[in-house]
Amino acid sequence: MQTYIFLDLDDTLFQTLRKCPTPLTEHPVVVRAYLPDGTPNSFATAKQQWLWAWLQQTGKVIPVTARDHAAFYRVNLAFTEEIILNHGAVILDKQGQLDSFWMAKMRSELTDAYPHLFSVWKKIEAYCQHNSGYTLRLVSDFDTIWYGVVKHSEGTEAILKAILDDILITTSAFTEGHLYWHLNGNNLAVLPACINKQYAVSYLLQRYTKQHGEIVSFAAGDSKTDAAFMALCDYAFIPKNTQLHSELLSIK
């Protein structure tokens, strides 16, 4: 039976050095991704190195990542199947070319989402102008704006949560379901509802099932927003000491 593995990358297969076990002399790591200037910034522990080797031997691995095209190709791993980027907004085929059907679908659905996204983004910009330390970015890839990201120089989730409490939670674009937000560590993403890893994974699962008949599927992810695409698969892996792991521990 054909096996497919849908794999989140950051904080699942590798992470920044500050999140790695210490001391490094006892817990050796290898570089897995780089900054645009070539500086190493993401590393895999011994267990993550083993996991990658095992997954490659187990089935066909499809990365499912929030990274854009440029950031993905700074990952030092060899993927040979389809690639899901930008929280599910972009799918590349095995040759690294755009899935034209999926791209057309996403761009069409963004037409209705843009007024809500840009309206909320103006509110966030105004808020951050009166509160220092924030970095804002509208993520653009393949000549298309997909979503917005907010970070803070203090690197804490609590600081970013203030934007949720003061702006996002009560804004109609969110309460009516036009947009949603994702907060994990020093990363607050504001996304159109049409962009979701779950939808991209579902699209590929249907394709693989049509090609091969019954398949077996695995998924791995670290954050609450990964849970929906992981639930589509037959089996799921959750890294220890991550957001999704903590969420499961809180269930009584």
Image (spheres, rainbow, N blue to C red):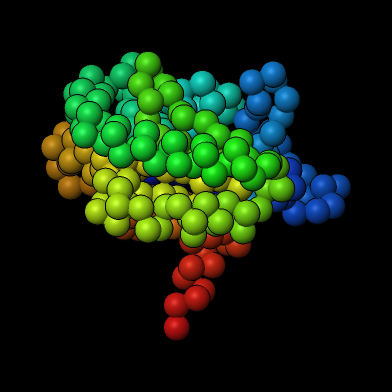
- Quadrant including the C terminus: bottom left
Relative side of 178 to 76, left or right: left
> Visible in this render: residue 3?
no
Could you say which quadrant of the image residue 49 lies in?
top right
Figure check: 149 above or below 186: above
Figure check: 252 above or below 160: below
Relative side of 213 to 190, left or right: left
Q: Position of residue 64 (x, y in %)?
A: 41, 39
* Count of picture labels: 0
Furthest toward the bottom, the residue is 252
Q: Position of residue 5 (x, y in %)?
A: 38, 44
Between residue 49 and residue 67, name the one nearer to us.
67
Relative side of 30 to 98, left or right: right
Q: Residue at x 56, y 56 (%)?
A: 162
Between residue 155 and residue 134, name the one nearer to us.
134
Figure check: 249 above or below 192: below
Q: Position of residue 150 (x, y in %)?
A: 54, 41
Between residue 198 and residue 174, name the one nearer to us.
174
